[in-house]
Image: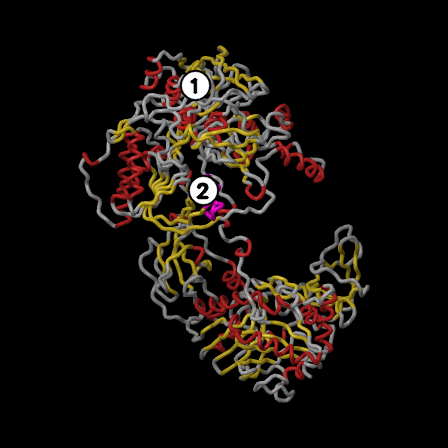
């Protein structure tokens, strides 16, 4: 039973009070260039996910708290959370990588 | 039955060592076992009381039905499983060594028929040649499936544990949520020392132990701590811990499971030992959901059995269990015993038995030259010792129920024991060393490491916030245990509190003196002189009846990994989870495979440590509290008016309202015809209602609906479809524009919560730039549909500001005003195909409005109708229902709804996916059609398959299935909707529907059966 902290409302709770939405930062191609999406990229967007052994960025929702979606980086091996961050926050680097991805302002077409 | 074995209580060296320390000789307790009355003492366990009464056989074994007696001491006991109580208080498979005796306890032995003493299933023992490991894979293969079904009944009857109760459990169970700084598991010397050190820092400490008495095996092990006898030291420390405000002591509490991030499940047996407490309202069990910042595992060790022929005979017991039973309950296992050991500790049992007046016929030690303190004591006491020897068979009488002696021989170079001599005895104490109880370390993926020198598994790589101390950590010397546990308690508590560690002077470190012992020598199997096993059984897993021969057979048949061998032989898979068997099995396998134990593979342990009752898992969430029932504002009226319910999501919705003497079918037909000919009313309060508000609301809805919403004018309604991004239809409903920046959307009842969450997901993660609020208001509004030719006539009679005239209130428009003085939102939409208005009012006014409409409609013959009539009415009109016509693989285009899928919008959820080659309309898709059976009276079952031939052999290709099917009272015949491959092009074709026992022929037709032009709903 993972212990999770919501970075939006600050609630700390059991995994059963949250809902995992799978890999974070998956880009939806039709949002940025509708009408120009290949079958391959649509297929990748819909069905292909990273399944790393180690740090993994994923979406979670604070179901029993504020209802907001947020992101978390979790080590799939140790099951420890390495970071909780809000949608739109800088994406924390994977351990071992040099610097954080640059902050983006929310724009249509990306999952932040 | 043999003579009673309670020794004179109170005898012994001094008060501390007196035998029967836990029982009160003056307080008798009566109980029954297998219907026979016995008397025990206050403080006994069921196990000790049975032993004291000379009841040696307590059950029959799982597979071979061999008579079995108690082997162990507590939760590790593999044999002594009994069924407690009866009726609504019955619990099977309880270890009799853990049951505290109370007045009136009733217990039954298990897996025997007709009686424990004479058991027909014992024939399995003689037939064992035909029941090798994996026998059900081999023996019961043919002929075909019917063969298995024949054998299955026999196997299920003959193999197994206690029967499941038939009656509902009458006891109460509860859950407890808790947090603490340090959880200490186990209350032996290690646990007490750790808890004391942790508590001294001010940390909040919970000390849990599965037994009623704290102290673990301290009363059986010698030694002194801080210059006190171990038992006195523990008594004093427990008393001061009990007084400390930051410490909670939890006796009778098993830490059953350890999960991620130090989440722990504990089972507290609150009332098992005292039925009066339960009668007075206490829960029987309490399940603790504990989050511990740090865990100290001081779970001790479990004594390892020795494997030799007939080592399962009643009267063969673990040495430490015998010693502990003697000390606690004053119970001796027999009159004349043999001790078979590979270690020094077991000598203490022999010494104490001798002290208590029980004769020791022989001490047999596999070691060639042991010289520890207990061995020398035995020598000095003149006990008959035999070194470098082994017991290799147990001889019995009374069909295996009474031991008459053991065969003892010298161990030879081959590892086999020589034939040797017969040593008469009536019980055998065995000890093969100790296995650290590392179960909780393994529960979250801890990998044990093997200590080759001592031949034990130890906790491997450290786990975050879990510290293993004492015997569980392979630390067996009392002095080392105390130092290690004290250090761990102080260290982890300071870590939790963020306090620096203080260097403590040596004088502050507790000292202890244990018994000086020699190392033990592991021996995995004692084989006799004859080749093979000669039909004699050397049990490894007592509870699942797995023998050394079974393991060797698995190896001969090619199994190499311990995980495969476990599953093939069922080793370690019984309710005791291999507590006494796993390590011996690994040792045997390593010998059979000629590999080291780490090469064979380490074993692991999964939760729960001991079984957890279903009642405790369910807690209070049973019966009416299992799931909340959502209430409509008119639920009370429905309940008073003969509603016949069906579950829809968490609601109970009226399926129909049968009048007195009316069948369900008659009620449904009457309700349908009332709507078609007069007027009907249905409660739609359960429909999902979501307000979508904000400057970007129109844009947002354009992106999540398949059709254009932003062009909708104020006060207008539009039917909309929602797809997931794979292009599959998942919800539909009417969208109403209330104001420029404010929409109300309707969802299906079952999807109301899901759809709101779905909108939030897109809004928050994909388009956080859109200025939109999504607010579910399902429960805030009561909503009713009033439909039928007289709908307008009825509603006109209501006091309010709504203009009901055909010109003032055209189809697909909305009015917002007042009805009966309350707010009202009225939409002219129809799911029945009749002239219809859906009226919403704040939930508090719902019942008044409902009753006012019924009163107004009385003159017109208004009928309330249920969900089934709703479905008949919509199916007659060919309207789809989410969940009937959709199943997660159906697109709007499959259902002929292309008019509701925008071709203008550049993007919306599902659009791109619909363009994929296998999603575009065409003969490869299943499409919605209507179905008229040739026999109009035949109503096809929903879900039945469509085929192209009236022959079912050879099996033809399925072409689709029936998605909705009803008797239509309007058409006076059956109607059905179906999804048929290339269905649109096949309208007019005959298709066949195989159902139970026959094949029904039918014609495919257009999927609208009634008022195709829609004249009625537009009237």
Q: Is residue B403 left or right of residue B19?
A: right
Q: Which residue is mark 2?
A: B269
Q: Are marks 2 and 1 on the same chain?
A: yes
Taking the view exactly as shown, the residue that stands out farthest to the bottom is B807
Label 2 crowding class (10 Å Cα cut-off): few <14, some 14-19, many 20+? Answer: many
Relative vertical location of residue B7 with respect to residue A100 in this rendering, above or below? above
Examine the image and state in which quarter residue B218 appears: top left
Viewer-nearest residue: A110 or B312: B312
Indicate the position of residue B590 as horizontal and vertical percent values: 46, 28
Q: Earlier in the sequence, mark 2 or mark 1?
A: 2
Label drawn at residue B339: 1
Indicate the position of residue B899 as horizontal and vertical percent values: 63, 76
Viewer-nearest residue: B518 or A54: B518
Q: Secondary structure at mark 2?
A: strand
Relative vertical location of residue B114 with respect to residue B400 in this rendering, above or below? below
Alpha-carbon distance for marks 2 and 1? 35 Å
The magenta-colored residue range is: B272-285
Examine the image and state in which quarter residue A26 appears: bottom left
Indicate the position of residue B306 as horizontal and vertical percent values: 46, 23
Image quarter (top left, top right, bottom left or bottom right) of the C terminus of chain B: bottom right
Q: Secondary structure at mark 1?
A: strand
Residue B283 falls inside the magenta stretch = yes
In the image, which is nearer the foreground, mark 2 or mark 1?
A: 2
Residue B41 falls inside the magenta stretch = no
Indicate the position of residue B888 as horizontal and vertical percent values: 60, 62
């Amino acid at each position: 039973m993972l212990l999770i902290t919501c970075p939006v409302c600050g609630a700390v709770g059991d995994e059963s009070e949250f809902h995992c939405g799978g890999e974070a930062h998956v880009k939806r191609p039709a949002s940025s260039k509708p009408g120009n999406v290949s079958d391959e990229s649509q297929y990748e967007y819909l069905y292909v996910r990273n399944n790393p052994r180690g740090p993994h960025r994923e979406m979670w929702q604070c179901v029993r708290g504020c209802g907001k979606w947020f992101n978390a980086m979790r080590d799939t091996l140790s099951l420890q959370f390495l970071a909780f961050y809000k949608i739109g926050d800088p994406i924390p680097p994977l351990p071992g990588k040099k610097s954080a991805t640059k902050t983006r302002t929310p724009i249509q077409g990306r999952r932040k | 039955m043999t003579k009673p074995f309670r020794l004179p209580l109170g005898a012994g060296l001094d008060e501390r060592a007196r035998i029967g320390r836990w029982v009160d000789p003056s307080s008798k307790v009566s109980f029954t076992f297998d219907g026979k009355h016995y008397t025990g003492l206050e403080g006994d366990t069921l196990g000790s009381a049975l032993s004291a009464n000379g009841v040696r056989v307590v059950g029959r074994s799982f597979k071979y039905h061999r008579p079995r007696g108690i082997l162990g001491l507590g939760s590790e006991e593999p044999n002594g499983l009994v069924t407690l109580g009866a009726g609504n208080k019955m619990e099977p498979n309880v270890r009799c060594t853990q049951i505290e005796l109370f007045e009136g306890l009733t217990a039954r032995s298990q897996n025997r028929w007709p009686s424990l003493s004479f058991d027909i299933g014992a024939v399995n023992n003689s037939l064992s040649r035909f029941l090798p490991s994996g026998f059900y894979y081999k023996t019961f293969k043919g002929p075909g499936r019917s063969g298995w079904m024949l054998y299955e009944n026999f196997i299920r009857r003959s193999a197994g544990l206690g029967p499941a109760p038939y009656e509902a459990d009458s006891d109460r169970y509860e859950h407890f949520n808790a947090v603490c700084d340090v959880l200490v598991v186990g209350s032996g010397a290690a646990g007490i020392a750790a808890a004391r050190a942790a508590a001294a820092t001010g940390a909040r400490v919970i000390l849990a132990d599965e037994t009623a008495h704290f102290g673990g095996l301290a009363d059986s092990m010698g030694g002194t701590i801080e210059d006190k006898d171990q038992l006195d030291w523990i008594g004093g420390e427990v008393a001061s811990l009990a007084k400390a405000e930051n410490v909670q002591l939890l006796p009778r509490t098993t830490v059953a499971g350890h999960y991620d991030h130090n989440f722990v499940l504990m089972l507290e047996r609150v009332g098992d030992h005292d039925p009066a407490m339960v009668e007075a309202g206490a829960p029987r069990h309490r399940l603790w959901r504990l989050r511990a910042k740090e865990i100290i595992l001081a779970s001790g060790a479990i004594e390892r059995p020795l494997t030799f022929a007939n080592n399962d005979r009643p009267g063969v017991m673990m040495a430490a269990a015998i010693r502990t039973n003697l000390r606690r309950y004053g119970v001796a296992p027999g009159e004349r015993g043999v001790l078979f050991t590979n270690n020094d500790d077991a000598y203490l049992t022999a010494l104490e038995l001798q002290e208590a007046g029980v004769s020791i016929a022989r001490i047999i030690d596999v070691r060639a030259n042991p010289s520890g303190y207990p061995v020398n004591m035995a020598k000095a006491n003149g006990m008959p010792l035999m070194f470098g020897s082994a017991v290799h068979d147990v001889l019995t009488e009374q069909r295996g129920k009474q031991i008459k002696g053991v065969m003892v021989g010298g161990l030879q170079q081959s590892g086999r024991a020589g034939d040797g001599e017969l040593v008469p005895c009536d019980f055998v104490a065995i000890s093969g060393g100790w296995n650290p109880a590392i179960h909780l370390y393994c529960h979250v993926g801890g990998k044990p490491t093997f200590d080759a020198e001592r031949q034990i598994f130890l906790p491997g790589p450290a786990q975050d916030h879990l510290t293993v101390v004492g015997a569980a950590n392979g630390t067996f010397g009392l002095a080392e245990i105390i130092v290690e546990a004290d250090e761990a308690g102080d260290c982890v508590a300071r870590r939790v509190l963020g306090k620096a560690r203080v260097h403590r002077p040596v004088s502050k470190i507790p000292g202890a003196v244990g018994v000086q012992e020699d190392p033990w020598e592991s021996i995995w199997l004692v084989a006799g002189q004859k080749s093979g096993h000669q039909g004699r059984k050397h049990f490894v897993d007592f509870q699942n009846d797995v023998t050394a021969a079974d393991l060797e057979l698995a190896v001969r048949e090619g199994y190499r990994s311990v995980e495969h061998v476990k599953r093939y032989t069922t080793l370690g898979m019984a309710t005791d989870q291999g507590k006494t068997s796993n390590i011996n099995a690994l040792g045997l396998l390593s010998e059979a495979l000629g590999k080291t134990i780490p090469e064979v593979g380490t074993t692991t342990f999964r939760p729960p440590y001991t079984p957890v009752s279903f009642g405790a898992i369910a807690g209070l969430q049973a019966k009416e509290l299992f799931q909340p029932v959502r209430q409509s504002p008119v639920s009370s009226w429905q309940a008073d008016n003969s509603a016949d319910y069906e579950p829809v999501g968490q609601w109970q919705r009226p399926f129909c309202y049968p009048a007195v003497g009316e069948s369900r079918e008659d009620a449904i037909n009457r309700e349908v015809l009332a709507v078609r000919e007069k007027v009907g009313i249905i409660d739609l309060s359960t429909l999902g209602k979501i307000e979508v508000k904000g400057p970007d609301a129109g844009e947002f809805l354009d992106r999540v609906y398949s059709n254009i919403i932003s062009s909708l004018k104020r006060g207008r309604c539009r039917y909309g479809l929602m797809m997931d991004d794979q292009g599959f239809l998942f919800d539909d409903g009417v969208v109403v524009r209330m104001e420029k920046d404010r929409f109300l959307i309707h969802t299906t009842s079952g999807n109301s919560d899901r759809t709101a969450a779905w909108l939030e997901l897109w809004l928050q993660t994909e388009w956080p730039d859109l200025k939109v609020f999504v607010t579910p208001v399902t429960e805030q509004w009561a909503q009713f549909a009033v439909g039928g030719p007289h709908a307008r006539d009825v509603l006109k009679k209501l006091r309010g500001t709504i203009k009901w005239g055909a010109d003032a209130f055209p189809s697909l428009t909305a009015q917002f005003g007042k009805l009966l003085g309350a707010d009202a939102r009225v939409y002219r939409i129809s799911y029945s195909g009749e002239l219809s208005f859906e009226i919403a009012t704040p939930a508090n006014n719902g019942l008044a409005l409902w009753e006012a409409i019924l009163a107004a409609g009385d003159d017109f013959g208004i009928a309330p109708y249920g969900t089934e009539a709703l479905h008949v009415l919509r199916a007659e009109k060919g309207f789809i229902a989410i969940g009937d016509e959709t199943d997660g693989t159906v697109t709007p285009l499959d259902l002929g709804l292309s008019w509701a899928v925008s071709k203008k919008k550049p993007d919306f959820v599902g659009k791109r996916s619909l363009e994929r080659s296998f999603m575009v309309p065409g003969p490869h898709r299943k499409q919605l059609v209507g179905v008229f059976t040739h026999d109009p009276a035949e109503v096809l079952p929903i879900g039945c398959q469509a085929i192209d031939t009236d022959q079912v052999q050879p099996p033809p290709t399925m072409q689709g299935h029936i998605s909705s099917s009803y008797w239509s009272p309007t058409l006076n015949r059956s109607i059905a909707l179906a999804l048929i491959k290339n269905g649109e092009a096949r309208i007019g074709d005959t298709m066949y529907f195989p159902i139970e026992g026959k094949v029904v022929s039918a014609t495919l037709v257009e999927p609208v059966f009634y008022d195709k032009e829609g004249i009625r709903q537009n009237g």
